[in-house]
Image (cartoon, rainbow, N blue to C red):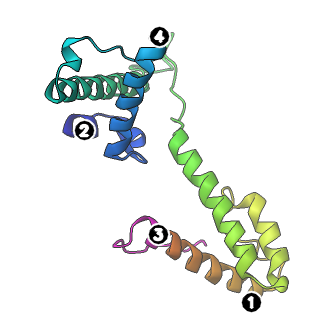
Amino acid sequence: MRRVAGAPGMDRFLAGAEPDDFVNAALEKVLLGDSYPNQGRRLSARNRQSAQAFMSCLKGIINSDLSNAINGAEASISHLPLGDTETEKGVVEAPEPIDPGRLLEDRDCKRELFTRLREQAGPELQPVIDAWEPNYLSADGIAHGEFDRRLVHRVRLLAREIMADFTKEVRPQATIAIPPSM
């Protein structure tokens, strides 16, 4: 696991994973191997002789899966070009890397934030929430000029409370640092 955690690009792979997930995936492959050998791992008679042999085989499957994940993560890292684009032909600047894990987190956070905002806010705050939602990820803050600043302030405070609750749910011991733009 130290090798996995230290490999570049594996933070996204391990973000939502629990140790049980790796064991369950290996067990699933063993079970699939009997019925569907192309989709799972078929155990030899030697690996079925004792619990010790089975556990050793299971560890091997888990190590193989993690090794494959590391190789995939390392292969997905974009390499920056060497050279100067103005003086050397064929040099291309790499685009900013897209982190799909971060995009999913942002989407889920936005969905849950606005669901809770609508549940907890009164009817007078709903127009402010409705105007803020489509621009949540791209705007610096809530639209100030369109609405009464007191309503915007109330939505901002409510959103901060909800984000603090998110942090407590995910990491109960964490300190909370909410961006001032919210």
Q: Secondary structure at mark 3?
A: helix
Q: Name which residue type carries label 4.
A: Asn
Which residue: 35% across, 36% down?
Answer: 22
Whether residue 79 appears in this view of the structure is no
Quarter where residue 57 is shown = top left
Which one is nearer the viewer's eye here, 35 or 136? Answer: 35
Q: CA distance from mark 2 to mark 4?
A: 31 Å
Q: Name which residue type carries label 1.
A: Arg
**Residue 126 coordinates in the image, percent (x, y):** 82, 77
**Residue 52 coordinates in the image, percent (x, y):** 14, 28
Which residue: 75% across, 74% down?
Answer: 118
Which residue: 52% across, 69% down?
Answer: 166
| Label 3: how many Cα within 10 Å (few below 14, some 14–19, many 20+) | few
Q: In the image, 51: left or right of 149? A: left
Q: CA distance from mark 1 to mark 2?
A: 47 Å
| Residue picked out by circle 3 | 169
Quarter where residue 172 is shown = bottom left
Callout in the foreground (3, 4): 4
Q: Which residues are magenta?
A: 168-182
CB under 8 Å between callouts 1 and 2? Answer: no
Q: Which circle's residue, 3 or 4, is located before the other in the chain?
A: 4
CB under 8 Å between callouts 3 and 1? Answer: no
| Residue picked out by circle 1 | 150
Q: CA distance from mark 3 to mark 1?
A: 29 Å
Q: Which circle's residue, 4 or 1, is located before the other in the chain?
A: 4
Q: Mostly what secondary structure, the magenta segment?
A: loop
User: Is residue 114 depicted above or below 92 in this figure?
Assistant: below
Disc marking residue 38: 4
